[in-house]
Image (cartoon, rainbow, N blue to C red):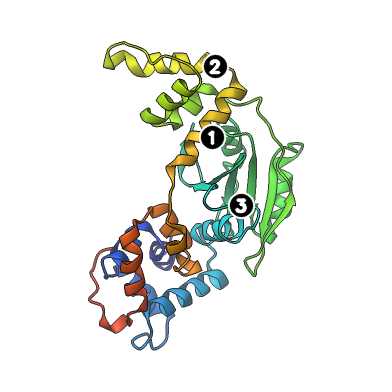
Amino acid sequence: MDQNTIVLNRVFSRNTFSLFLKGSCSSAYMSAVKRYIQFPDEKTNRTLISEIYSYIQENHRNEYFYKNSLLNSLLINNPEHNPLTTVALTEIPIAKSKVDFVLINGQANVYEIKTELDNFDRLETQLRDYFKAFDHVSVVTAPVYEEKVQDVLGENKYVGIYILSDSGKLNRIRKPEEFRKSLDKTTMFKILRKCEYEEVLIKLGAKLPEVTQFEYYQACLSLFKRIQINRLYTEYCNVLKKRCHIEFEKYLTLPSELKAVAYFSQIKNKQYEEINTFLDSKYKEKRCTTRI
């Protein structure tokens, strides 16, 4: 990975965003401004971030660009999904893979991203892993890779296909179909936090085990595995929906370019004022750190 790629990937990272919240900026942000922006000193950080994002869209459509496009298209600007009752999650470990993007509303949908910068070596393995934990799975990729995705999927008609156009519009080529035969209760259980699997067990009528702390995890897993899969899956998705909460009216004040990093950073109410203060200030007025 070359230095330009590293810099652009880090501009929209959570670490850089956390510095924005403190009214500062990372070395990655400063490097991107220096390399890709003309006459930055009189521009606000909001303008600079927008221009860097535009450069990424035109020249370097990385994973963040895809995640941000998914969030804006499927959740923020989608009249079919209420952001107050629909939740997006990212970077969930599933078996030997890590899912890029999950949207949970009436059903849970997994989106595996394959950018122009990715290869397809692990796609089949990733899809198998995702179906162990979720029943709707899709691949999101660039127009140039549409045929390749269809070739890799072959006879697998359950996996949906989405294309992110050059203009950033998300187009559905094939709708995902429900597939629950591969759901694995142990894999699902491992995704849940302690309070979450306890909530699922209680909701479905199980009594939490009275055993030693050492035995507790396995005892809960044993109870979890006894529950009928359709009942279990419904409550499993319901509890995952509770992981992400945003103050939506304040969230809408943020620029579209920062929607994903802000959403997945789970910023607090008072931080909206802090980030907007940073965005509306001029770049030359900020004392930046050397941190990445």
3 or 1: mark nearer the eye: 3
Q: Mark 2 — residue?
A: 227
Going by the numbered disc 3, the residue's amino acid type is His
Going by the numbered disc 2, the residue's amino acid type is Ile
Q: Mark 3 — residue?
A: 81
User: In the image, is residue 174 above or below residue 164?
Assistant: above
Q: Quadrant of the C terminus?
A: bottom left
Going by the numbered disc 1, the residue's amino acid type is Cys
User: In the image, is residue 47 above or below residue 105?
Assistant: below
Q: Nearer the viewer, residue 144 or 2?
A: 144
> Pointers 3 and 2 in contact (CB under 8 A)?
no
Left or right placement of residue 132 versus residue 270 in this view: right
Q: Secondary structure at mark 1?
A: helix
Separation of residues labelled 3 and 1 (CA atoms): 16 Å
Q: Position of residue 89 (x, y in %)?
A: 48, 46
Q: Mark 1 — residue?
A: 237
Q: Quadrant of the N terminus?
A: bottom left
Q: Position of residue 163 (x, y in %)?
A: 68, 57
User: In the image, is residue 95 above or below residue 90?
Assistant: above
Viewer can see residue 184: yes
The mark found on residue 23 in the picture is none
Separation of residues labelled 2 and 1 (CA atoms): 15 Å
Left or right placement of residue 107 versus residue 244 in this view: right
**Label 3 crowd bin: few (<14), some (14–19), many (20+), radius 10 Å:** some
Work out whether mark 3 precedes mark 2 in sequence or the reverse, and give the earlier one.
3
For residue 20, which quarter of the picture? Answer: bottom left
Q: Position of residue 287 (x, y in %)?
A: 22, 76
Work out whether mark 2 precedes mark 1 in sequence or the reverse, and give the earlier one.
2
